[in-house]
Amino acid sequence: MISVVIIGNGNVGSHLYKAFLYADGVTATLINSRNLEKIPQADITIIAVTDDVIAKISSKVKNSFVVHTSGSVSINSLKNNTSKGVFYMLQTFSKNKNVDFSEIPFCLEADNDEDFLLLKKLAQSLGKKVYQIDSKQRKALHVAAVFVNNFTNHMYKIGYDVCTEHSVPFEILQPLINETAAKVATLLPEKAQTGPAIRNDKETIKNHLFLLNKNQQKIYTLITKSIQNGD
């Protein structure tokens, strides 16, 4: 049985705690990051808080093995005097949206092989996709994730705004969104690229720009040039 303490009851901590409640071979306790006076002993202490307070909180933890869940923070940012590691789940977490942990990639790092195997066992109690990723690789992965997730979602938001402005139901775009995401499972993104930019369809591009406001025009033009330049 692996005992786990999760510090932080935000999106990541809350989802992780709920998942561990149903995991075989794991007992979990969730505590608020502002209540660190009596942290229970555990095999693994998971700090699931915002990046800027990981160092401060970890410096107060005396447990034997402490990990954080950040994609962009180095393992060395942990300031505990015991073993350190990273338990990074590459997924977007929203408070009221259920997550299928069996499909989440777990990107793990630890000070030594024994701790890594313990983290791997913990990850496998929830999912099947486990990767050994060091801090430098994880930082690059996190940047890539911002492009494919956060920036892409902002494009959805712009698409929604354009639809709303012209009284078109945004739901019409849903099958296209699904197909575009599914394509990159079997095709390289470069090979999957379609649209007026890759075709250099100047007339269509001009017509599109005419429909957009100034900020949308800047984004459209920048991305069009990036596609055409193969950036």
Image (cartoon, rainbow, N blue to C red):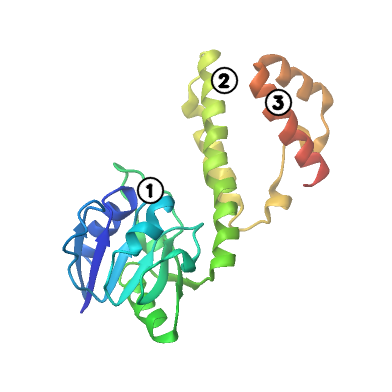
Crowding at dot 3, Cα within 10 Å, few <14 / some 14-19 / many 20+, comes out as few
Q: Point out residue 4 in the picture as x, y percentages from the top left corner.
A: 24, 69
Horizontally, residue 187 falls left or right of residue 168, namely right
Residue 218: mark: 3
Q: Point out residue 127 in the picture as x, y percentages from the top left corner.
A: 36, 67
- In the image, residue 169 sits, relative to residue 125, either above or below, namely above
Q: The residue under label 1 is which amino acid type?
A: Phe
- In the image, residue 177 sits, relative to residue 145, either above or below, namely above
Q: The residue under label 3 is which amino acid type?
A: Lys
The numbered mark, 1 or 2, whose residue comes first in the sequence reads 1
Q: Nearer the viewer, mark 3 or mark 2?
A: 3
The numbered mark, 1 or 3, whose residue comes first in the sequence reads 1
Residue at figure coordinates x 58%, y 52% from the top left? 143
Q: Between marks 3 and 2, how big is the CA–CA gap?
A: 15 Å
Residue occupied by mark 2 = 162
Residue at figure coordinates x 52%, y 38% from the top left? 153
Residue 93: mark: 1
Quarter of the image holding residue 210?
Answer: top right
- In the image, residue 196 sits, relative to residue 123, either above or below, namely above
Q: Point out residue 47 in the picture as x, y percentages from the top left corner.
A: 33, 61
Which secondary structure, mark 3? helix
Q: Between marks 1 and 3, how big is the CA–CA gap?
A: 30 Å
Residue 219 or residue 46, whichever sits in front: 46
Crowding at dot 1, Cα within 10 Å, few <14 / some 14-19 / many 20+, comes out as some
Quarter containing the N terminus: bottom left
